[in-house]
Image: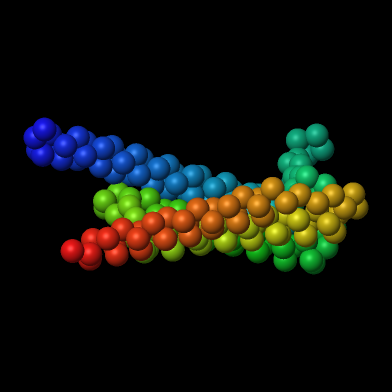
Amino acid sequence: MNANENSSKANARLNRIKIVSRIFRVLIGICVVIFALTAIVALLQSIIVLLGGKVVPGQSMTVHLTFSPSQTYVVPSAIPLSVQFLGATHLCLLAFGVIVLNRLFKLYEHGSFFAVGNVRSIKILGLVVAGNGLIQTVLEFIAPQRSIYFNQLVLGLLIMLIAWIIDEGRKIQEEQELTV
């Protein structure tokens, strides 16, 4: 078996991973831009209405703010402060998660697959998902129906477990490379 054939197959696989990583980084960027533009338009519409813009009955905008399946608000002033705080924390966590995910795909794009930075990024993503699950659980608990969901919390812990396994495998591989 020729060693060059294996390396060309490996290079083709690496190139596919790099291309897919680049595509996902571009998609993440597009989603961030769309979300930012949507938020800006909604903010401008709210400011126009607050400054005395005309509201035509039947044609005015109706907003439903949903923080969890059991908590939907129509009037922003009716949102309790605790729900506002948890909602803002949720958005900050999501933004941070998108930044970390973009960083992970950037590492993959550069050909780094089992490095310390990748494991750290995966652990952080697990913490973000678990934190989001914790926020959703608290939001559901303070809702009138008081239902509790642990799905995202368990998923985040699973992601952190996978990151730990990858890190241990990386350490074993490093030790074997140093062994003569």
Q: Is residue 138 left or right of residue 40?
A: right
Q: Residue at x 35, y 44 (%)?
A: 21
- Quarter holding the N terminus is top left
- Vertical arrangement, residue 86 with respect to residue 25, above or below: below
Between 67 and 49, the residue placed more toward the observer is: 67
Q: Residue at x 26, y 37 (%)?
A: 13
Q: Is residue 143 left or right of residue 6?
A: right
- Vertical arrangement, residue 85 with respect to residue 102, above or below: below
In the displayed orientation, state which residue is furthest to the right: 144
| x then y, percent, for residue 2 | 9, 35
| x then y, percent, for residue 127 | 57, 61
Occupied quadrant, residue 153: bottom right
Q: Residue at x 34, y 55 (%)?
A: 114
- Quarter holding the C terminus is bottom left
| x then y, percent, for residue 154 | 66, 52
The answer, for residue 51, to whether it is visible in the render is: no
Between 97 and 112, the residue placed more toward the observer is: 112
Q: Is residue 106 left or right of residue 9?
A: right
